[in-house]
Image (cartoon, rainbow, N blue to C red):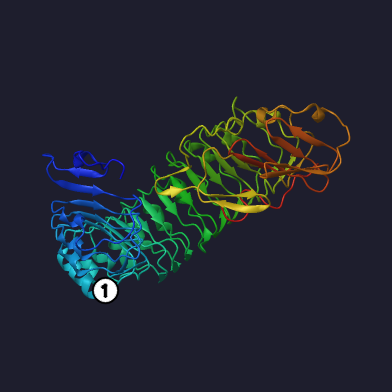
Amino acid sequence: MESWEEGIDCCSWAGVTCDRMGRDVIGLDLSDSGLQGTIPSNSSLFHLSHLQWLNLSFNNFSPSPISSGFGQFGKLKYLNLSRSQFSGQVPLELSYLSKLTSLDLSGNTEVSIGKSVMDRLVQNLTKLRELHLDKGDYQDNIFRLPNLRVLTLNRGKLPPSLSSLKALSYMDFQSNNLSGTIPVSFGGLTKVMYFCLSSNNFTGQIPSSLSKLEDLTYLDLANNNFVEIPSSICNLSSLQVLDLSRNNLSGMIPQCLGNLSDSLSVVDFRKNNFHGTIPKKFAKCNSLRTLVFNGNQLEGLLPQSLVNCTKLEVLDLGNNKLNDSFPYWLEALPKLQVLVLRSNRFSGRIGGFKTNSSFPMLCIIDLSHNEFIGVLPTKFFEDLKAIKTAKESEVKPKYMGEENYQDSIVVAWKGNDLKLERILTIFTTMDLSSNKFYGQIPQDCVEFPLSKKCKTDEPPPPPSIVKEDNDSIFTSGFGWKAVLMGYGFGFMFGSTMGYLMLKIGKPELLIRLIEGEWHGKHGLGQGET
């Protein structure tokens, strides 16, 4: 540690907290400090007898076991050894920490807890409020922890008597290879606010008993094999995040979804088998930020009640069977940043704008693989201010999403689909391919000046390939007009193919165009997003 210098009061060192008198070290945070090697039981660390708070997470103590010396911290209330490459069995001495309220041993894949040690931990650590574990033998004994509020179990079996933990408010059992159905008894966990069973192998119906969890704000059942969603889910009036993506859910989306909760901010139902129409009424959507129905079998019109969702930032309806005209009225959503309508049956001309500044925040738009026709209106491009002004001014990258949910999307990159697990706020992309647009691209589109060649009918130059910084390839010469625009733009028109890749610093804008019909094989929203 750079600030740990001899001759300087240790209470001023980074990561060190002392008591009010400045005499005893009571807190030590060495997380993500690059520490390596073993921690022997006679380490000077264990001389800090007044320590109440210790965080050694995100270091590399491989292949060190968890030292029995940790049992000497008789006053310790918080211990975090997560993701630090410990190995071996958890020592019995940890059960001596009778004042412990939080214990985190997660992320150490080579650490396990034997039954006898687990029995002693449960017997002695009765003040535990938070417990984060990986694999171990923690079947029924774990439920003798009456004060437990937070429970995270990884790579283990679902304990059968979980409903005994009446004080539990946070439970995360994701990626445990769990199977079967969700026990109906989970409905008895009436104080649970965070409920995550994602990336398991659960099957059957989502139990209606979950509707009894009146305080539930976060429900994540993504990446399972559920087949049915009960209408009673609409009784969860406190929900903020509802993620049921990547299941086998079928039937119709409950019509009450649009009136579910004033606090609902995320609804993600992508990659299921829902059919029918999108709920018609979105009245209680004052907080809705993300709405994703990509990859279902939804039909009909896009409900105009979505204009009530004034905080909506992400609207992804790609890969359905929606049959409507261009939803110009979405221009009324002042914060809309992502609009994906890919691979539906939208038709007609793009137009009908009513406001002076349409889609001012839109930076990702995918209208590809529909049946749009006509000439692109100049106003459509002029108003895309977020795409035109994308900058990399932020010192630290910023991402779309929130603390418990990250927006993700699929984009085309050098001919391949690339999934972005998180979306940088400076990322911009536009895909208008595989429609029936015609005519010239508006001269003022995206406020980048067309070269003089845009206004002529001169024959194109011979076919060529131009490489820029070994990063992007621009192909030209495939048709009646080859256009280059300033600021790094490259437009390619052709009778058989067209591809545009332009680079503005870090943002990447991808557009495919072709005379008569613009089309491409890869793009935003194709497949999974």
Task: Kindly state the secondary structure of the residue where label 1 is placed.
Answer: loop
Q: Which residue lies furthest to the front in this view?
A: 6
Horizontal side, residue 6 vs residue 344: left or right: left
Asked if residue 275 shows in the view, the reply is yes
Q: Where is residue 509 in the image (x, y as percent from the top left)?
A: 64, 40
Location of residue 494 by image quarter: top right
Residue depicted at 87% across the width and 31% down the height: 457
Count up the numbered dots: 1
- Please say if 453 is above or below 106: above
Tell me the quarter of the image containing the N terminus. top left
Q: Where is residue 233 in the image (x, y as percent from the top left)?
A: 40, 56
Q: Where is residue 447 in the image (x, y as percent from the top left)?
A: 67, 27
Asked if residue 441 shows in the view, the reply is no
Front position in the image: 247 or 414: 414
Q: Position of residue 175 (x, y in %)?
A: 42, 64
Type of the residue with mark 1: Gly
Horizontal side, residue 28 vs residue 439: left or right: left
Front position in the image: 210 or 169: 169
Q: Which residue lies furthest to the top in this view?
A: 356
Q: Name the residue under label 1.
A: 114
Horizontal side, residue 91 vs residue 498: left or right: left
- Please say if 319 is above or below 361: below
